[in-house]
Image (spheres, coloured by chain):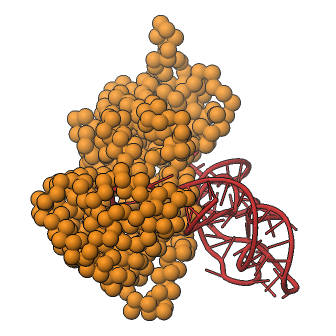
Chain colours: A orange, B red
Amino acid sequence: MKNENNSDLITSNFIREIVKQDIASNKWEGRVFTRFPPEPNGFLHIGHAKSICLNFGLATEFGGTCNLRFDDTNPIKEDDIYVQSMIEDVRWLGFEWGDKIHYTSEYFDQLCDFAMSLIKGGSAYVDDLNANEIREYRGTLTKAGIDSPFRGRSVAENLGLFVRMKNGEFPDGTKVLRAKIDMASANLNMRDPVLYRILNTHHHRTGDTWCIYPMYDFAHGQSDSIEKITHSICTLEFEDHRPLYDWIIDKLGIHHPQQIEFARLNLAHTLLSKRKLSGLVDEGHVSGWDDPRMPTIAGMRRRGYTPESIRDFCERIGVAKANSTVEIALLEHCLREDLNKKALRMMAVLRPLKLTITNYPEGQVEELNADNNPGDPASGTRAIPFSGELYIEQEDFMEDPPKKFFRLTPGKEVRLKHAYIIKCEDVVKDSNGNVTELRCTYDPDSKTGGPTASRKIKGTLHWVSVRQSKKAEVRIFKHLFLNENPADDKESTDLKSALNTKSLEILKECRVEPALVESKPGDRFQFLRMGYFCSDLKDFTPSTPVFNLAVTLRDTWAKINK
RNA sequence: UGGGGCGUCGUCAAGCGGUUAAGACACAGGUUUUUGAUGCCUGCAUACGGAGGUUCGAAUCCUCCCGCCCCAGCCA
């Protein structure tokens, strides 16, 4: 999938170069066949999006195919709800897979045959050592391992034992099938890795058909091989496993894809590990996998991110082998850039302050014309009700303003967007000295198109009419973590202490222009001068509209003010 | 003290023996603007982890050193 609008921004990356060279040299008869192989044990996040965009993107770019394959070899952790969410997320991101969805579990028979063939070739054996013993026999980083006493079993014995494992004759953990490679290898993955373990567990797809399940290392490479994948793209930590995959595939003499490793994404102030994210969900620190603060695809979708912005982001961050942490600012930029083009402008007052126009005709209501998107004339216009009683944003008024504050202050003029120029004449306060109302006058000729409409006024405010505006809830989100790299936070061993306690702010007294309550869940808008917001996918109803802050507008004033 | 990787601007990241060392984000300044938004313009690495070496010429090749990441699941 190309980001047409940013084609000039696309730079090369080493994987794209490899693919190009392979096509040029006709290495795979010009084929490009990739796959995205998640384990269905959690929700997909922005880190997966990088891999999805890479794999599906390469296939699209070079006229190939990308399979979606669920790597479901560990029934203890996996569940169909995760496969369903992953299917939805990949599709939402805008990608299409080949004729069907693939599952490693559909290769269990073949994988089992591969194991038999390894046994027959004397390259695998059944080991009776338990997990602890296997660890002890494995040695350490600097010390060679020791052969298992069961390593010398005959082919016939191994075959018999493995069949009995498969037939369910042994309890969990009592036996494993191991590759017979080299217990002294400097690469720990080559020290007779476990190929099959006994797990008397129900599998979400194969049910109770199996009680032995292949390890990832024995399933992944062969699955790629079975699917005739040409480029097996994975993350850096599997670099050490490549010699093992090569060993197995060569022993089996089957199609040998080319594995290429790249650095996974790290995002500042964000945790990208399914394990830790599920911790946030399980411990109730967020409302679920789709909490808008979550870096999951589902969370970002609910927050208001567009598939286009995520794809653009994944293209811009590049692909390399160096570990790196991308700033949130880049992600936010991608969203703003996309939404600036697409989002209709609306007016919403998040923290209302009453403003009365004393010289406006009592009871009069005008329908003012407003453009829906100044950058896109095709988006048309809409009518907004204006009256003598309005709400403006509390932060848009200051009694004792700092220099360069060009919003409303006593005695000064300001323009109301799409409407008139007003002047603050009086400030009403309650007994505690809090400002409760502003009393202003307006210049009737200053309406858009009017004789004094072009008067130069520094500040322009958004507003809504008291009577016609609707009440709404707006949810403001900030980083879930204060630390730039929460994963590196050695101090806080538990997630809780690393959390930003102010990551969610709920504003229940917001007032929005009437058109907004007619929006559909998932609709995205620019609330003028505030940011981009999205009607909540779950909680929005016309009677209780709920909007999520997707991203604020750039705010130079906030910077100056600091 | 084992093995596998990686070190180019604040953050990503091109670069593949001869370039003024791309571009983006961020940042700074200017300008347009009825969003302090957007747009537009300008600036932003004599420098490529360090030290040597090869070469007419090195971020790119060689050597040594330094730093960071990954690996001791019957997880993926």
Residue B43 coordinates in the image, percent (x, y): 76, 60
- Name the residue located 40 percent from the left edge and 64 percent from the top edge: A147
Foreground residue among A379 and A362? A379
* Residue A50 in which image quadrant: bottom left
Q: Is residue A121 visible?
A: yes
Q: Nearer the viewer, residue A91 or A36?
A: A36
* Residue in the image at 46% along x and 61% along y: A145
In x, y percent, where is residue A82?
A: 25, 54
Q: Which quadrant is the C terminus of chain A positioned in?
A: top right
Expressed as whole percent of the image width and height from the top left, the position of residue A2 reads 42, 73
Give the residue displayed 59% in from the left and 37% down from the top: A558
Q: Is residue B31 above or below residue A411?
A: below
> Which percent across, then down, holds residue A165?
18, 63
Left or right, A534 with reference to A559: left
* Figure check: A271 above or below A342: above
Horizontal relation, residue A273 to residue B24: left or right: left
Instruction: Name the quadrant containing residue A376.
Output: bottom left
